[in-house]
């Protein structure tokens, strides 16, 4: 979902799916006052005043993501109960502006959207991609980065994958319920014919997909470029990366990663958007943090940070 960059995973599972199991799939809540990352923002009482009364009182916001998509968000190797990464540093910076303490939850994919809708989690930040359909019906979304997608392939690229025009007849792994699935299907329809169509294989996370790719069960795994790059750096003798041209991506899906908030919580959405825009101003922590994690090329201008940018729907409104 970039990196990413994210997870970046570009997934969003339908709200009605897996509701019954959401509670059991929520990870342990882990509060952090700070995890480092760039220049230190300062508390802004005007922006903090935008928060819902309950959060103003508790001084806590819960953030959910699957902690296995470095460099966006991953387990701290020194403490498995802590997350580290690009998203974590940005969350900490935004939390300083708002005067709150972030609480992190390691959440499996199937639990994320149901958890958001049920109120078990306040915000999803790490593996959400922004699309018109999602802004219209599922959540309010604030963009926080934009990054190319890439395909992880076996070392030597035995299937000769050059871009989405060369996946015909292959099995491509994608995150469950992701927009990458639309990318594969759309590309297959455009570039392939008959029995040469590409097929998708769903996996709940990158770890399972990487194992399948190494075993030859699938021919590639699509994720944000920085996430793929991180895997290649960790296993250079096993894998390599093929970057997907941006025009091929945007023809069928989005490569904008977003922060998702329930449409029942528009005050929180507006507060987060204002705080993120604040740190993205010239000289703010946003650029420093993006550079720290090698994601400067995925950074957005402050003017691009707004609620529901594709539909222009006000926070809390459905189409």
Image (cartoon, rainbow, N blue to C red):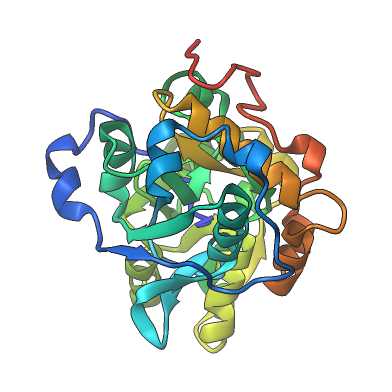
Q: Position of residue 232 (x, y in %)?
A: 57, 78
Q: Is residue 166 above or below residue 196?
A: below
Q: Residue shown at 71%/73% (left/top)? A: 292
Q: Is residue 257 at all visible to an observer of this figure?
A: yes
- Write down the quadrant of residue 227 in the picture: bottom right
Looking at the image, residue 64 sits to the left or right of residue 144; the answer is left
Looking at the image, residue 236 sits to the left or right of residue 306; the answer is left
Q: Residue 109 or 199: which is nearer the viewer?
A: 109
Looking at the image, residue 258 sits to the left or right of residue 15; the answer is right
Q: Residue 237 or 131: which is nearer the viewer?
A: 131
Q: Residue shown at 30%/30% (left/top)? A: 15
- Write down the quadrant of residue 57 in the picture: top left
Q: Residue shown at 54%/89% (left/top)? A: 237
Q: Residue 198 or 240: which is nearer the viewer?
A: 240
Q: Position of residue 198 (x, y in %)?
A: 46, 46
Q: Is residue 255 at all visible to an observer of this figure?
A: no
Instruction: Count all numbered tags in the image, as a single digit.
Output: 0
Q: Position of residue 158 (x, y in %)?
A: 54, 73
Q: Residue shown at 76%/69% (left/top)? A: 291
Residue found at the very far top of the displayed protein: 319
Residue found at the very far right of the displayed protein: 282
Looking at the image, residue 53 sits to the left or right of residue 228; the answer is left
């Amino acid at each position: 979902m970039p990196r990413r960059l994210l997870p970046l995973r570009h997934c969003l599972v339908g709200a009605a799916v897996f509701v019954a199991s959401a509670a059991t799939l929520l990870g342990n809540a882990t509060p952090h006052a700070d995890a480092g990352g760039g220049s230190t923002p300062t508390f802004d009482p005007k922006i903090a005043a935008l928060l819902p009364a309950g959060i103003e009182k508790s001084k806590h916001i819960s953030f959910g993501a699957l902690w296995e998509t470095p460099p966006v968000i991953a387990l701290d190797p020194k403490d498995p109960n802590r997350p580290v990464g690009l998203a974590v540093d940005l969350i900490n910076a935004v939390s300083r502006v708002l005067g709150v303490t972030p609480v992190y939850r390691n959440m499996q994919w199937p639990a994320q959207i149901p958890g958001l809708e049920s109120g078990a989690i306040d915000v999803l930040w790490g593996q959400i991609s922004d699309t018109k359909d999602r802004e219209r019906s599922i959540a309010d979304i604030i963009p926080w980065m934009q990054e190319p997608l890439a395909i992880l392939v076996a070392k030597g690229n035995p299937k000769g994958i050059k871009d989405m025009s060369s996946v015909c007849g292959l099995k491509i792994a994608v995150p469950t319920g992701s927009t990458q699935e639309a990318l594969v299907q759309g590309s297959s329809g455009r570039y392939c014919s008959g029995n040469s169509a590409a097929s998708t294989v769903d996996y709940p996370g990158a770890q399972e997909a990487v194992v399948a790719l190494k075993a030859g069960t699938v021919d590639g795994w699509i994720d944000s470029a920085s996430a793929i790059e991180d895997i290649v750096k960790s296993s250079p003798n096993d894998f390599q990366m093929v970057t997907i041209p941006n025009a091929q991506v945007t023809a069928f899906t989005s490569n904008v990663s977003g922060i998702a908030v329930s449409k029942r919580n528009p005050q929180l959405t507006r507060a987060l958007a204002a705080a993120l825009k604040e740190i993205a101003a010239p000289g703010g922590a946003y650029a420093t943090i993006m550079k720290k994690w090698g994601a400067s090329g995925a950074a957005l201008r402050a003017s691009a940070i707004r609620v529901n940018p594709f539909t222009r729907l006000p926070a809390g409104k459905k189409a």
